[in-house]
């Protein structure tokens, strides 16, 4: 079979590329090939099944600060297709979107099926062919065209778009062709922690400031081209049955993806449970509380904006007797409590990854790509979009935005060529 364009990978980036290309030229014969039995599987489960389509940062440069890898390269593309363009694209197709308090953008329906239905409807409208259960084993150029080999069939195309995410088999295929690939390591994962202070607190979430420490408990310095201070991450921390998760942890896992992989996920974290308070302010407040609440038991309730169960756990970890009153608190009690509140040290042994939402740091070396078109610098009419590139972001809709931008720009470039 001969096509004008073959998109390998039936995920978010692949569909967005195909639909935008078909809209620019409805006469093109376009094929999406997917190795799995279903397309858009990752879209289906993303954002807890709600699909966090993008984030409400509407300027290119601030948006790039959310990408540990790809910040420089995305600045130009974001000037072409950004968050507002994404919102307009979906709403023009009848998908109503909403911005939540933390800036994340979801379909108003709170269902990823809304996004999937939109893509499938557009693909049907434009006559895009979708072929599932078709793993691709090789690609190559023959007389100016691309030959795409499946296990049982072959396809010919003028242009090929690789949108296969972190699939190692496809990365191996292109690496054999001479495309430079950076080895993939996990990003966006939770920390496995066994510690008495949190063992009975699963489900509890609270704002915190978290920093990474190496095996000797020295701060880990993360290198970045970003203006963002990477010495810590601030955001909600969720205590789980296996350790800690939530945006505050996931951000650190993204920024520290390679360093933590080198440490074999054996390191420490320092958690400040009162991120808005400086040490001296805390000392002053504790001194006031000792007087104002003199007759109250310290463990009874938290004088700070902390969940009661967490407060009681930290008081216990400070070696303060359960029945001790504020009036009887010693200098040593306060020093221990301050340490637990502002500098709780936890040992991390391993990680837990959401397998369905697996995000990696790694992929096609960004020096291989012309980001004005998303075309390979080595091979004419070969394009790379989405997570196959060494681009990844923190949680919040940023990975999808990179996919939409790349797919849109690649579609424009392919249309011009054809």
Image: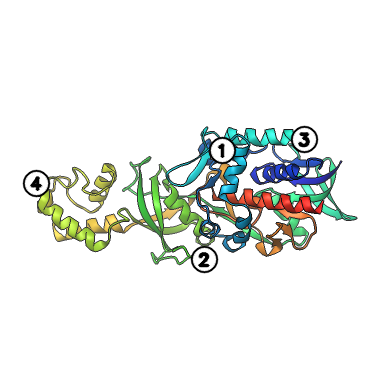
The part of the image, by quadrant, that contains residue 11 is top right
Which of disc 1 and disc 3 is earlier in sequence?
A: 1
Q: Residues within 10 Å of mark 4 (few under 14, many from 20)?
A: few
Q: Quadrant of the N terminus?
A: top right
Q: Is residue 37 visible?
A: no
Which residue is the site of mark 4? 295
What is the secondary structure assignment of the residue under circle 2?
A: loop
Q: Nearer the viewer, mark 4 or mark 2?
A: 2
Which residue is the site of mark 3? 127
Which residue is the site of mark 2? 224
Q: Residue at x 70, y 44 (%)?
A: 20
Q: Residues within 10 Å of mark 1 (few under 14, many from 20)?
A: some
Which residue is the site of mark 1? 45
Distance Cα–Cα, label 4 vs label 3: 76 Å
* Residue 198 x, y percent position in the rendering: 34, 46
Which of disc 2 and disc 4 is earlier in sequence?
A: 2
């Amino acid at each position: 079979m001969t096509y004008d364009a073959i998109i390998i990978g039936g995920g978010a980036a692949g569909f967005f590329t195909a639909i935008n290309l078909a809209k620019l030229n409805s006469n093109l014969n376009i094929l999406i090939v997917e190795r799995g039995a279903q397309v858009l599987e990752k879209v289906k489960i993303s954002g807890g099944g709600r699909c966090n389509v993008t984030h409400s940062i509407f300027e290119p440069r601030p948006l790039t600060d959310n990408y540990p890898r790809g910040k420089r390269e995305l600045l130009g593309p974001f000037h072409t297709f950004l968050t507002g363009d994404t919102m307009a694209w979906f709403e023009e197709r009848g998908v109503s979107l909403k911005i939540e308090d933390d800036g994340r953008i979801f379909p108003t329906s709170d269902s990823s099926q809304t996004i999937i239905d939109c893509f499938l409807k557009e693909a049907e409208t434009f006559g895009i062919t979708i072929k599932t259960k078709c793993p691709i084993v090789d690609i190559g150029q023959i007389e100016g065209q691309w030959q795409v080999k499946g296990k049982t069939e072959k396809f010919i195309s003028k242009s090929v778009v690789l949108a296969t995410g972190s699939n190692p088999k496809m990365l191996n295929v292109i690496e054999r062709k001479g495309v430079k690939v950076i080895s993939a390591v996990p990003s966006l994962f939770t920390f496995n922690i066994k510690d008495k202070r949190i063992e009975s607190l699963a489900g509890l979430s609270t704002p915190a400031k978290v920093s990474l420490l190496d095996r000797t408990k020295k701060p880990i310095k993360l290198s970045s081209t970003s203006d963002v201070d990477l010495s810590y991450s601030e955001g909600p921390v969720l205590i789980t049955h296996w350790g800690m998760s939530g945006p505050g942890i996931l951000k650190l896992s993204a920024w520290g993806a390679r360093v933590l992989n080198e440490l074999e996920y054996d390191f420490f974290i320092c958690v400040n449970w009162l991120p808005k308070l400086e040490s001296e302010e805390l000392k002053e407040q504790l001194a006031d509380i000792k007087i104002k609440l003199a007759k109250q038991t310290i463990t009874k309730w938290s004088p700070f904006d902390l969940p009661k169960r967490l407060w009681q756990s930290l008081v216990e970890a400070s070696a303060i007797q359960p029945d001790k009153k504020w009036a009887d608190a010693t200098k040593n009690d306060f020093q221990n409590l301050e340490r637990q509140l502002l500098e709780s040290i936890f040992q991390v042994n391993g990680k837990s990854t959401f397998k369905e939402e697996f995000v990696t740091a790694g992929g096609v070396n960004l020096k291989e790509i012309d980001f004005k078109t998303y075309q390979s610098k080595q091979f004419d009419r070969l394009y790379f979009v989405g997570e196959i590139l060494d681009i990844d972001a923190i949680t919040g809709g940023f990975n999808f935005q990179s996919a939409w931008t790349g797919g849109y720009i690649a579609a424009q470039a392919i249309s011009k060529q054809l």
